[in-house]
Image (cartoon, rainbow, N blue to C red):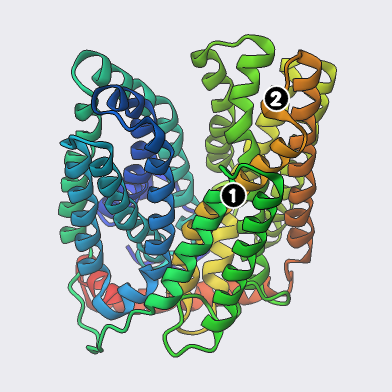
Amino acid sequence: MVESNGTGDASWSELLTARYSAATATLCLGVALFAFNGFLVSTSLPTAVEEIGGLALISWAFTLYLVLSIVGGSAGALLKARLGARSTLVASALVFLAGTLVAAFASSMTEVLVGRALQGLGEGVIAAICYALIPELFPSRLVAKVFGAEAVVWAIAAFGGPLISGLLTEHLSWRAAFLVNVPLSLIFIALVLRIVPRFFGASSPLSVPFLRLAAIGGGIMLVALASIAGTLALEIGLVAGAALVLAAVVIIDRRSRTPLFPSDAFALNTTVGIGLWIVLFMPVAQAATAVYLVMTLQKLWGYGPTMAGTFYATFAIAWSLCAILVANIHSQRKRAWLIRLGPTLLVAGLAIIVAGFALDLPAVVMAGQVSIGTGFGISWGFLSQAVMESARSGERDRASALLPTLQSAGYAIGAAIAGLAANAVGYPLAASPEALRSATMAIFMVSTIIGIGALIAGYALPMKKRAALVDQSSAIAASNSLESASHSSSATAREDLA
């Protein structure tokens, strides 16, 4: 299909046409590997511990996965540039598959940890490269719809993951829940082999910046350790140390010949730099709801696990529905304002949650959750697209691949900060409903303040980039049209990727 421009009208059904259906399925399945795996493991792992022991290590099953996924994601763009997307995705999927099998057939928690580490490393690379492939496989006018489709995958995983894992664990075995990833991995590999062409770029030696990757892993590990530190002073020290290490990595990376990040990462005067601050701050602020909301609902209002989990899932539902509703918006000006409205609704939602606990009204707390999900839904796809399309020449892959990695890092940092705030206000020791309510309000007040950082960054996002984005999208579309005139659609996609 020849496209007249990159920002014209497009229907959802176009994602399912012969030209884009396989690419849509591939990228959504890459997201599904990450999304379903998290829910499957969180539901089945407690049963695994009862069988093989290792309760003291259970938190590390999640920590190691997160740390290695961030390290893998940081290296994703570099691996794609050196080895090509096809080879890197297949190799990463095989690493993920190996980790799944190790964990599923483990006889000790140590083996489970090894499997989870391999899963994290493989999935981190997969997520990063899948993001980097979005602007290569789809025209600009379809990118928002791709993010909407991925949001639907997350919503399905939020509901279907725990259900599938619970049924398999209860009626078969916790190992069966882990093994759900096996067919998903094999299908993903088959799709990659079909859709992503072989790498025909200039060969170059694979020089991996192990020191910087190790520093990234070390920084995130410090964050993880802060969430389980025994004293407030140690928690503050670990979080501060992590911030210094990660900031040093960014500074050193800018001067490196083999950079992991775009050259203007976290700059305060570019769309990419400011956009990445929003991508970081929004998950950091929202993480408190993931860590403490369900627990508080159970302890304060006596909700059961299912009801509390469903209450929390309103965030994912709002995100998915809103991502679908706004995907048809093509006006660059409207998109820019939605990017700014997203953090605004995030801050408003967190403040509403504080008010809901103060008033002792669950309905108000739920309204806050919906506001937060709406904020992410209306802005996240457009924000990601703006960062991708505003990257400097030759840096689009690094900017795109950094998005899911930075999001994961934001949740890790946010969980640690929420834990620090919780310990500072006595949340673990709260013995009365009044004390628990006050401590919870304090935690979400801190999150609200962090969210203001995302709000400020949103309104600082350069509006002047809007015209450049339109011109760039049109140029890409014109190039695609010329190639479509002389080649078949499948050959065109293969040459574009190569």
Q: Dot 1 lies on which element? A: helix
Residue 181 image offset from top left, x and y in percent: 23, 39
What is the quadrant of residue 488 in the picture? bottom left
Residue on which disc 1 sits: 226
Amino acid on which disc 2 is placed:
Leu
Residue density around tag 1, few if under 14, some if 14–19, many if 20 or more, within 10 Å: many
The disc placed on residue 429 is 2
Do we see residue 477 in this rendering? Answer: no
Residue 21 image offset from top left, x and y in percent: 28, 50
Q: Which of the two residues, 236 or 97, is positioned nearer the viewer here?
A: 236
Q: Quadrant of the N terminus?
A: bottom left
What is the quadrant of residue 214 in the picture? bottom left
Relative horizontal placement of residue 485, taking residue 148 as reference (left or right): left
Relative horizontal placement of residue 161, taking residue 357 as reference (left or right): left
Q: Residue at x 56, y 48 (%)?
A: 411
Amino acid on which disc 1 is placed:
Ala
Relative horizontal placement of residue 397, taking residue 53 as reference (left or right): right
